[in-house]
Amino acid sequence: APFAACQAQARGGLRVRSAARASPSSPSCGSFALASRPQRRNARHLRGRGQTPSGVVHASSEDNNGGAEEATIAREREGDAAAVSSSSPAPPSTKWLAPAGVALGATLFVLSRVGGGVATLDSLARESVPLDVALSNGRPSVVEFYADWCEVCKSLAKDSGKLKSQYGDRVNFVMLNVDNPKWAEEVAEYRVGGIPHWEYLDAQGESKGFVVGNLPPDVLAQNADALSKGGATKLPFVRRVANASPLQAPSPSATVESTMPRDHG
């Protein structure tokens, strides 16, 4: 009752009854320490844990119990931190990172060696139909004269590869390297003065026309399509000459032992 009277006095400014003030066994309102909001929360927390919130009654006992309450709060905070730590997901395992990196590196290396699936002069030469086979198998032929140093030849290799993929079952695609002395007779016969030079032969091996140089892919595609139809179909483009690389004269220092281009190219 005295404590309730003091609470009423603190809230509404009411006067405590004289009986409560005069009672020697009842402490005055001065001896009561009205709890602040944090203290009241701690008091409710302590009551929930089965402890007596004596710290909110007497100011003298607050000093004695303050250390214990701070220790309790510290323990609770440590428990919360441990709970958060235990609920955090474990970091992903890194044991697979090294093998995956090795596999990716190997894949990139292989792609770099094969041109990433894009045709190159070297791949076209390896897959070239030998000239003697092309002249005897009854199919029309596209004979390309090229050189490894020819930049125009390199730039058009991708387009030649696409045509081979599209028409390779009906047309022979032959690659002849002008730096190989083996093809000197063919270079002279078809009057190859610049490269790349495409000579179009019918199924009997007779020339139907030629184009030379850095030509649009559509020119090469239309000629290959017309050639694949056989018969008397005329080529839409003949004797078309664009920017071409002139043939290089053999070096005087070249010897017989020098490495020659592959026979089929």
Image: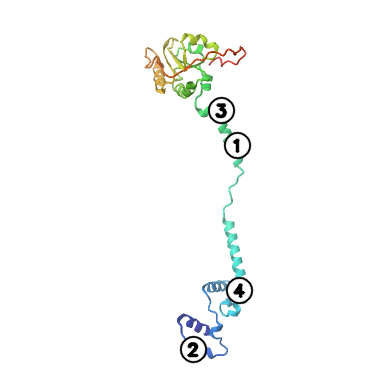
Residue 201: % across, % down: 44, 12
Does the residue at mark 1 contact the one at mark 4 (Cβ under 8 Å)? no
In terms of image quadrants, where is residue 96? top right
Mark closer to the chain start, 4 or 3: 4
**Between 252 and 153, the one nearer to me in the picture:** 252
Does the residue at mark 1 contact the one at mark 2 (Cβ under 8 Å)? no
**Residue 261: which disc?**
none
Q: Residue at (51%, 90%) from the top-left corner?
A: 19
Q: Residue at (51%, 8%) from the top-left corner?
A: 185
**Residue 66: which disc?**
4
SS class, disc 1: helix
* Three-letter code for the amino acid on which mark 1 is drawn: Val
Q: Which residue is mark 3?
A: 113
Mark closer to the chain start, 2 or 4: 2
- Asked which colour scheme the image uses, the reply is rainbow
**Residue 102: which disc?**
1
* Three-letter code for the amino acid on which mark 3 is drawn: Arg
| Relative height, residue 85 to residue 182 (above, below) | below
Find the distance from the CA under tag 3 to the CA under tag 2. 102 Å
Q: Which residue is mark 2?
A: 17
Residue 192: % across, % down: 47, 12
Mark closer to the chain start, 3 or 2: 2
Does the residue at mark 3 contact the one at mark 2 (Cβ under 8 Å)? no
Q: Residue at (62%, 72%) from the top-left corner?
A: 67
* Three-letter code for the amino acid on which mark 4 is drawn: Gly
Q: Label 2: few (<14), some or many (≥20) within 10 Å?
A: few
Q: Label 3: few (<14), some or many (≥20) within 10 Å?
A: few
Find the distance from the CA under tag 1 to the CA under tag 2. 89 Å
Residue 213: % across, % down: 44, 18
Find the distance from the CA under tag 2 to the CA under tag 4. 32 Å
